[in-house]
Amino acid sequence: MPICLTSDQMRAVERAAIDSGRVTGQGLMERAGEGVVSAILDYFPALAAVPGRALVLCGPGNNGGDGFVVARLLRARGWRVELRLLGEVARLTGDAATACRNWGGEVLPLDETPDDALQAADLVVDALFGTGLQRPLSPDLAGLLHRAARRPLVAVDILSGICADSGRLLADPDRAAQAALTVTFDAPKRGHLMAEGAARSGALAVVPIGLAREVEEASRDPAVARCPDAATLDPRALGKAGGGHKYAHGHVLVLSGGPGRGGAARMAARGALRMGAGLVTLGCPPDAVPENAGRLDAIMLRPVADAVALGEMLEDARLDTLCLGPGLGHGDGVRDTVLTALRAGRGTVLDADALTNFKDDPETLFAALHPGAVLTPHPGEFARLFPDLAGRLKGVPEHGPAYSKADAAAEAAARSGAVVLLKGVDTVVAAPDGRLSLHAAVRAREVPWLATAGAGDVLAGFVAGLLARGLPAFEAAEAAVWLHAETARRFGPGLIAEDLPETLPAVLRDLAPTG
Ligand SMILES: NC(=O)C1=CN([C@@H]2O[C@H](COP(=O)(O)OP(=O)(O)OC[C@H]3O[C@@H](n4cnc5c(N)ncnc54)[C@H](OP(=O)(O)O)[C@@H]3O)[C@@H](O)[C@H]2O)[C@@H](O)CC1
Ligand SMILES: Nc1ncnc2c1ncn2[C@@H]1O[C@H](COP(=O)(O)OP(=O)(O)O)[C@@H](O)[C@H]1O
Ligand SMILES: [K+]
């Protein structure tokens, strides 16, 4: 399973590799520099053909050390390289000091970098700070990087000013830079996938520097965040191979609100059905039956007047999965309905209104939640249930590592006792036991057409469909997020929410050709 790491996790990986005796810090730095140069040559083919001019900005730590190696290797390829250092050569230590000696060229002061030097550069290498950024960039540094980004800017490990753990800006937002390319080592950092870091890192190259074995070991640590891809979704779990009648594939009950408000629940139901749930029933207030009957065929319809009626209906144990929230409505009756649904202990997705109804009393909801439940809030709904956690995600952080969306989702899952799927361009899935999964809809997985009304309702249905198919809550949420984005990518421009369930079969077919 692909993963992404925090700074501490990356340092542990590095330490384990060095302690094993297989690598040295200096060897890692050398390979990091080589990796950056080869990524530059791949990404800028014109500069691979004709050596250019580089301005390399080095910081006082090991990120700067990588910069010295890059400078030396570019020079060896015939490039004209100007190197500027933040701080003094005499204060460099360890591997960075060695890398500086091996460079052997002129080291100019960073704070005197003239605009001419920036303008003359074919590219600027940002080797100021990597995983060691602990506090916001000074205005001068932020200004320099901002100006440097007028030229193609290549970030070593992570763009300076982005917190590697959270992706949040540790710099004045008005002077934030944008990298054309970020080159990181052996595994992405969380900061490449969340918040500003997802958008500002530019293209992301992950180059091997000899830590693959330790990264593989880290991927077995439940505390390390996973980033599933097409290759790691389990086609056996998603396909319908093996026969079995419809009840073998689960029965989802989606509850809807009153007349004129059923669209969201119908889309969720359609999503669950397309995901392969054996049966899907829409439950709605009796006066909404005529409307829904006119709109549904394969999806069954039952009147569900209130929480008592729901309780009676749930005596049928074959109704194994519930989805509540899209278009559900507001009021005490709705809260009772949600609590009745949770008491049944089924796989349960709570979205939208099912969450918002508890904004004045989230503890009542948390007390009823169980590990088979998945909450799918967008950031606004999240803030209603977890105002303190949402508050920590606001504003410009004052130090690193900054509080991250992953931290917030993890705390929410631990507090509520349910899986939390916190939506956005960067989506985080967190389990109460500490497992995390990240999906960033950026770069190759960019999918702006998903910003359309109802996309979240369909996602709730996708999660419910997978729960009905027997996936555990965390895995169902994780796979649904990937499939949701993939489906939107497959459809492309013009996507509306209704297209998502209809496009899902093509995505499933590619994943499980025999399913
Ligand atoms: N892990 C690995 O496997 C490998 C890691 N490698 C590389 O090492 C990098 C991590 O190196 P690192 O730990 O030395 O930290 P780094 O990012 O250079 O910054 C620390 C320095 O910056 C300073 N400083 C911080 N914030 C500041 C601010 N706002 N403004 C001004 N100064 C600030 C801080 O100063 P201090 O806080 O001590 O005053 C300290 O001097 C990593 O990103 C990768 O590129 C590769 O070589 C190979 C394998
Ligand atoms: N620009 C975007 N890129 C990727 N995914 C997006 C983008 N905008 C929205 N989404 C996704 O679309 C869904 C929208 O859900 P939600 O906010 O609940 O909307 P709605 O209530 O209209 O259904 C979420 O899964 C979210 O992650
Ligand atoms: K950097």
Image: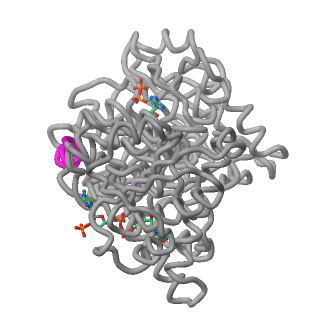
Q: Position of residue 297 (x, y in %)?
A: 64, 18
Q: Position of residue 258 (x, y in %)?
A: 37, 16
For residue 389: magenta?
A: yes
- Secondary structure mainly formed by the magenta segment: helix
| 36 shown above or below 298 | below
Q: Position of residue 173 (x, y in %)?
A: 26, 37
The one of 302 and 124 positioned closer to us in this rendering: 124
Q: Position of residue 441 (x, y in %)?
A: 51, 38
The one of 341 and 148 positioned closer to us in this rendering: 148
What residue lies at 55% left-to-right and 63% top-to-bottom? 72
What residue lies at 22% left-to-right and 40% top-to-bottom? 172
Q: In which quarter of the image is the C terminus?
A: top right
What residue lies at 62% left-to-right and 36% top-to-bottom? 486
The one of 257 and 191 positioned closer to us in this rendering: 191
For residue 108: magenta?
A: no
Q: Give the range drawn in magenta.
A: 385-395
Q: In which quarter of the image is the N terminus?
A: bottom right
Q: Report ligand 3 position as a quadrant.
A: bottom left
| 510 shown above or below 366 | above
Left or right of 507 in this view: 347:
left
